[in-house]
Amino acid sequence: MKRRDALLALLACLLWSTAFVGIKAGFAAGARPFFFAGVRFFVSGLLLVPVAFFVEGSDKFITGIKKHWGFMAAIGFLQTALLYGAFYTGVGMIPASIAAIIIGAQPLLTSAVSHLVPPGERLNQRQWFSLILGILGLVILSLSRNTAGNASSAKTEITGIVILLLALSSGTISTIWVSRSSRVVSPLVLSSGQFLFGGGLLLVASFLVEGKPSITDSTTFYLALVWLVLVSSTAVTIWFQLLQKSGVGAGALSVWKFIIPITGALLGWLLMPGDSPDTGSVAGMSLIAVSVLFFFRSEKPRS
């Protein structure tokens, strides 16, 4: 990977790692998961439309929408509605630091699926061993969530972990699809279109499932919302741009996401009240981090 692409991947992952604290802040202000996610991504899509229109030009923008609307709708369902609907629901059930650690397992899942789906990004024995280490880390993390003997809280947190794994699966499918797709559509056009469609679906689901929104602390909510909109608009557009570059594989690119659990967990421990490390969390996070680093080191050097 070129140095510029590596720096862009690093920037996107650092931005994503701040999202856990922002989401928790929005929840503390009274936001519900589907509503919060829906507003965030629908507004992100609206903001990206004039940017895409200006950068790509009116003809390319309109042609892209007409020609690839079905593809954008499918990615919007997987990458925004399903992924972030599950993601926000899961984050609402567990501490921000634990959520960051779970999401950090996505590079392992993406690499494994990339290996299995033709034409495949082949994995060697050391890389498969790193995947097993990552799974072991998730198991330790899940089993350690006894929340000081509170069975009800433990059940809630384990349910949140399972829901986050569903979110990872959806994100993995959409990542590989964008990377392998032969469709030529601008990352800006794709991001704006899929955000609008996926965010709209989440808002509809919010009114059907959650009812009328009730925000108790509007200042905190809007500050968190503005930051998350900037994060999603910038990070996802960068990621789609990298995925569509030749020579940048979905599996290898996703390995950069090992940064997310480390910085995300640290921010959660530093900024969120009641969120602190314990033995199980540190052990699970350490295994996941080691597995991803081991996976990265196992790749043969490239000229």
Image (cartoon, rainbow, N blue to C red):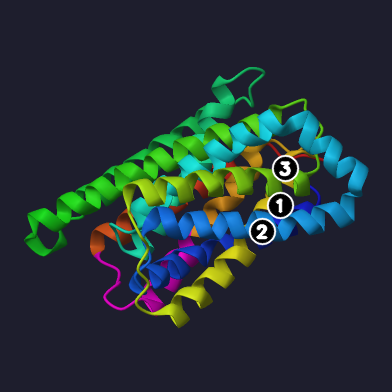
Q: Which mark is residue 74?
A: none
Judging by the rendered image, the residue that carries numbered circle 2 is: 233
| Residue 299 percent location from the top left of the image | 64, 38
User: Helix, strand, or loop for circle 3?
Assistant: helix
**Is any atom of residue 124 visible in this view?**
no
**For the residues marked 2 and 3, what is the alpha-carbon distance in whole angstroms?**
11 Å
Judging by the rendered image, the residue that carries numbered circle 3 is: 190
**For the residues marked 3 and 1, what is the alpha-carbon distance in whole angstroms?**
8 Å
| Residue 229 percent location from the top left of the image | 60, 64
Residue type, numbered disc 1: Thr
**For the residues marked 2 and 1, what is the alpha-carbon distance in whole angstroms?**
6 Å
Q: Which mark is residue 237?
A: 1
Position of 65 relative to 151 (above/below):
above
Is there CB contact under 8 Å for labels 2 and 1? Answer: yes
Q: Which span of residues is magenta-colored?
A: 261-278
Position of 299 relative to 36 (above/below):
above
| Quarter of the picture holding the C terminus | top right
Residue type, numbered disc 2: Ser
| Residue 97 percent location from the top left of the image | 37, 64
Residue 274 belongs to the span the image colors magenta: yes
